[in-house]
Image (cartoon, helix red, strand yellow):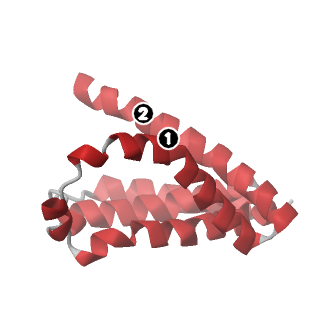
Amino acid sequence: MRKQLFFILPAGLAGALMAIQGGLNGLLGKTIGLTETTFAVHLTGLVTILPFFLTKLNSLSLAKLSKVPWYAWLGGSLGVLIIYGVALSFPRLGAGKATTAIVAAQLFTAFLLDRFGWLDLSPRPFRTMHLVGIALIAVGAYLLSQQK
């Protein structure tokens, strides 16, 4: 349990940062446009990570790159779609509603990945309580989307 707590804390921090990032992306999208925002976010991300990448160039192995399955390279493309979707939904739904919908879909997809061991994950059992938890989040997303 202690080992899991060690990983739960950074996951929680990442979740909080994702909500903040969504708000920032939405603000940027309203100001400069969605396509421009998607480009700008990835460009600033590249500028941020570049110094770390440059320090690793000596240890870069082309042999390792050739062993990567083709679909593992799609993460960057998915990032473009994610940034676009977040920048589009946050200003229109609000941070709470958009994040709830994102988390509900993310959780359902994550449990499918775990259950079937897709993307080289170790298969994990899917229990009825997992489905109940996902359903409760989906109901929460629906309730949060209702107007007064």
| Nearest to the observer: residue 10 or residue 128 | 10
Q: What's the residue at 52%, 56% (across, down)?
A: 103
The disc placed on residue 10 is 2
| Label 1–label 2 contact, CB within 8 A | yes
Left or right, residue 60 beside residue 14: left
For the point 64% across and 58% down, the residue is 41
Question: Of residues 130 and 121, which is closer to you in this image?
Answer: 121
Numbered marks: total: 2
Q: Can you give x and y, in whole percent of width and height, for residue 10 in the image?
A: 42, 33
Residue type at mark 2?
A: Pro
User: Which type of secondary structure does the marked residue at label 1 adopt?
Assistant: helix
- The residue singled out by tag 1 in the image is 14
Q: Quadrant of residue 127?
A: bottom left
Q: Nearer the viewer, residue 46 or 108?
A: 46
For residue 52, side relative to residue 28 (left or right): left
Q: Amino acid at mark 1?
A: Ala
Q: For this rendering, which residue is in front, 22 or 125? A: 22
Q: Residues within 10 Å of mark 1 (few under 14, many from 20)?
A: few
- Badge 2 element: helix
Q: Is residue 1 visible?
A: no
Residue at the outermost front position: 58
The image quadrant where one finds the C terminus is: bottom right
Quick one: quadrant of the N terminus? top left
Report x, y in % for residue 131. 36, 60
Left or right? Give the position of 21 relative to 122.
right
Q: Is residue 39 visible?
A: yes
Q: Is residue 18 above or below residue 91?
A: above
Image quadrant in which you'd find residue 94: bottom right
How far across and how far down the image is residue 6, in percent?
32, 26
- Alpha-carbon span between mark 1 and mark 2: 6 Å
